[in-house]
Amino acid sequence: MKVTDLARKLSITPDSVRYYTRIGLLNPRKNHTNGYRDYGQRDQLRLNFILSARQLGFSIDDIEQIIGIANQGETPCPFVRELIAQRLAETEEKFNSLVKLREQMSLALTQWKEEPNKEPTADMICHLIENFEHG
């Protein structure tokens, strides 16, 4: 099947299919008659795996490693479990940081509601930020 057919089947753009081909995660056969890449069922399954992995937060490097382990005939499952545990810890850390940032922004908005606008001076750019009392 052509790149557009594969893209349509998986509801992605043809450029996404081309990207994964360019970086070597997909290896379609080349049609010697017209020079087009010919994607088969195996490419569709591989691309579906890639999309699922990306949706779970795995990076391209992670996916390459997982595929590499599988290509050696070994199960990548222990590695995948370890990686997802790492990604979850990273996500929790980012989430907690964003919650703190949200709280700071909310506090700033509350503090700044009644504050007047002030012109900048040689010693001050924006008094709202400079006088912010963070918790």
Image (cartoon, rainbow, N blue to C red):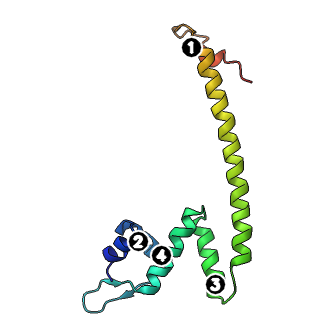
Camera-near label (4 vs 2) is 2
Give the CA separation, mark 4 to mark 2: 8 Å
Does the image show residue 51? yes
Depicted 122 relative to depicted 11: above or below: above
Dot 4 lies on which element? helix
- The residue carrying pointer 4 sits among few (fewer than 14), some (14 to 19) or many (20 or more) residues within 10 Å by Cα, namely many
Instruction: Answer with left or right where residue 18 lies relative to residue 102.
Output: left
Cβ atoms under marks 1 and 4 closer than 8 Å: no
Displayed quadrant of residue 116: top right
In the drawing, what numbered circle is on residue 113? Answer: 1
The residue pinned by badge 4 equals 47
- Marks 4 and 3, the one that precedes in the sequence: 4
Q: Please identify the quadrant where the N terminus is shown.
A: bottom left
The residue pinned by badge 2 equals 10
Give the CA separation, mark 1 to mark 4: 50 Å
Does the image show residue 24? no
Give the CA separation, mark 2 to mark 1: 48 Å
Give the CA separation, mark 3 to mark 2: 23 Å
Give the CA separation, mark 1 to mark 3: 57 Å
- The residue carrying pointer 2 sits among few (fewer than 14), some (14 to 19) or many (20 or more) residues within 10 Å by Cα, namely some
Q: Residue at x 37, y 76 (%)?
A: 6
Cβ atoms under marks 3 and 2 closer than 8 Å: no
Cβ atoms under marks 2 and 1 closer than 8 Å: no
Give the CA separation, mark 4 to mark 3: 15 Å
- Marks 1 and 4, the one that precedes in the sequence: 4
Q: Residue at x 66, y 15 (%)?
A: 131
Amino acid type of the residue that numbered disc 1 sits on in the rendered structure: Lys
Displayed quadrant of residue 81: bottom right
Residue 60 position in % (x across, y down): 56, 67
Residue 113 position in % (x across, y down): 56, 14
The residue pinned by badge 3 equals 70
Cβ atoms under marks 4 and 2 closer than 8 Å: yes
